[in-house]
């Protein structure tokens, strides 16, 4: 696992000592535990339900799913305007880059910009994209299957969802090789995050300018030529919207797929259950999405307030960790167990409230296609004994490498 030394900050005067916990959400893993297991240690009764972490600039952590959902849904108390990451490097870079719109805005402005790409993720559009994803999945698996082994991340996970996404934006598929490492730095605790963001912004800025002059039918063209409250969208705002889509679209689904396949490679009973009864698939996907939640977004306190007995001050950063909510033992019995029969209540995997991920339906469709077509062609596979999986932690977890064999 790639890692960097943790940065510890002084405890603010308004934070009581009993609410401070020694937990770094960007570097949580001990020994060989998996990512969500690391967060499950927060269920220890000695750790407060709302605690202060002195790492990554210092911030509150909400460890209960219901508190996380409440904060996601309440932009009047928990604003996005000051950034959506507790990473101090990310915060320092905010004034030097385009705002990531609409995630770094609150309603009603946030909703105005969200409408610019909402039509790309409707149920009808997702159904069409699912057909493309299925054709691509079959093509990739048929090429991989005869070899008896693959590096799943680079040979499948970084192709299926990312090719579909690049087509939506009207970007050349080969550009993903340049863009993937730049986008990855934005969700990792990377020291060169600013330089990577600058390169991404330059890339997107060029495409927005080109599409505004000569628009096509792609999503960047639609955004670059959109009307916002009666006026042509500002170039910098169009760049911010497209930049957010690019960062979100190049990482999370590929890592979610990789986590699922990492699990299935070690659980033949779960693979065989899905093969024996495809009716299990919808609930299985929901359970996978819960169990392998991977993002650690943030908000900041919009004002001084009492939140469930904890005094927060205006400007305090607050981490809304989806892995923490996913393993909350007050909500989920035996949360680390993957149980296809589990009736999961609302989960925070895709966020909640006004900023809920617009691509959640597409992500579900792509995961469904992967499971159906892979298990049909390669039903019995395992971790390659000659190589170990690799991950990087940070704002999100990223699976860098997943060697499989069969």
Image (cartoon, rainbow, N blue to C red):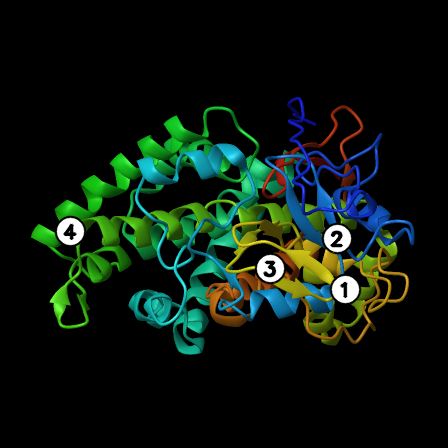
Q: In the drawing, what numbered circle is on residue 211?
A: 4
In the image, 371 versus 101, the foreground residue is 101
User: Rounded to the nearest whole Å, what is the CA distance between mark 1 and mark 4?
Assistant: 45 Å
Asked if disc 2 and disc 1 are in contact, CB closer than 8 Å, the reply is yes
Task: Specify whether residue 287 is in view.
Answer: no
The mark nearer the N terminus, 3 or 1, is 1
Q: Taking 128 as reference, is 51 left or right?
A: right
- The structure residue drawn at horizontal position 86% and vertical position 54%, both measured from the top left corner, is 43
SS under mark 1: helix
User: Rounded to the nearest whole Å, what is the CA distance between mark 3 and mark 4?
Assistant: 31 Å
Expressed as whole percent of the image width and height from the top left, the position of residue 317 reads: 57, 48
SS under mark 4: helix
Q: Which residue is mark 1?
A: 275
The mark nearer the N terminus, 1 or 4, is 4
Q: Nearer the viewer, mark 2 or mark 3?
A: 3
Q: Which residue is mark 2?
A: 379
User: Rounded to the nearest whole Å, what is the CA distance between mark 2 and mark 1?
Assistant: 8 Å
- The structure residue drawn at horizontal position 76% and vertical position 44%, both measured from the top left corner, is 381
User: Rounded to the nearest whole Å, what is the CA distance between mark 2 and mark 3?
Assistant: 16 Å
Q: Which residue is mark 3?
A: 367
Q: Nearer the viewer, mark 4 or mark 2?
A: 4
């Amino acid at each position: 696992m790639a890692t960097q030394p943790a940065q510890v900050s002084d405890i603010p005067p308004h934070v009581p000592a009993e609410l401070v916990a020694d937990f770094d959400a960007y570097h949580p893993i001990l020994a060989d535990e998996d990512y969500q297991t690391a967060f499950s240690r927060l269920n220890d009764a000695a750790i407060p339900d709302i605690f202060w972490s002195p790492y990554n600039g210092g911030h509150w952590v909400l460890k209960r799913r219901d508190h996380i959902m409440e904060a996601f849904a309440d932009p009047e108390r928990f604003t996005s305007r000051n950034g959506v990451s507790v990473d101090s490097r990310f915060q320092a870079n905010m004034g030097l880059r385009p705002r990531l719109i609409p995630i770094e805005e609150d309603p009603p402005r946030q909703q105005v910009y969200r409408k610019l790409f909402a039509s790309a993720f409707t149920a009808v559009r997702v159904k069409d994209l699912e057909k493309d994803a299925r054709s691509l999945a079959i093509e990739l698996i048929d090429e991989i299957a005869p070899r008896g082994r693959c590096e799943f991340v680079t040979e499948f996970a970084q192709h299926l969802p990312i090719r579909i996404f690049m087509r939506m934006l009207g970007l050349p598929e080969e550009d993903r090789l340049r863009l993937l490492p730049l986008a990855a730095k934005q969700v990792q605790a990377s020291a060169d995050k600013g330089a990577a963001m600058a390169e991404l912004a330059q890339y997107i800025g060029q495409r927005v300018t080109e599409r505004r002059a000569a628009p096509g039918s792609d999503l960047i063209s639609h955004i670059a030529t959109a009307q916002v409250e009666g006026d042509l969208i500002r170039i910098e705002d169009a760049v911010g919207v497209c930049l957010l889509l690019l960062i979100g679209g190049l990482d999370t689904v590929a890592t979610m797929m990789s986590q699922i396949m990492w699990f299935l490679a070690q659980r033949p009973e779960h693979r065989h259950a899905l093969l024996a009864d495809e009716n299990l698939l919808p609930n299985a996907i929901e359970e996978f999405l819960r169990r392998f939640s991977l993002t650690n977004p943030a908000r900041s306190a919009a004002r001084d307030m009492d939140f469930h007995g904890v005094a927060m001050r205006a400007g305090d950063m607050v981490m809304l960790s989806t892995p923490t909510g996913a393993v909350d033992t007050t909500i989920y019995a035996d949360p680390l167990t993957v149980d296809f029969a589990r009736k999961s209540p609302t989960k925070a995997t895709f966020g909640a409230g006004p900023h809920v991920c617009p691509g959640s339906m597409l992500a579900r469709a792509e995961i469904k296609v992967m499971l159906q077509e892979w298990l049909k062609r390669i039903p019995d596979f395992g971790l390659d004994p000659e190589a170990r999986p690799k991950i990087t932690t940070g704002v999100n977890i990223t699976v860098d490498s997943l060697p499989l064999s069969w």
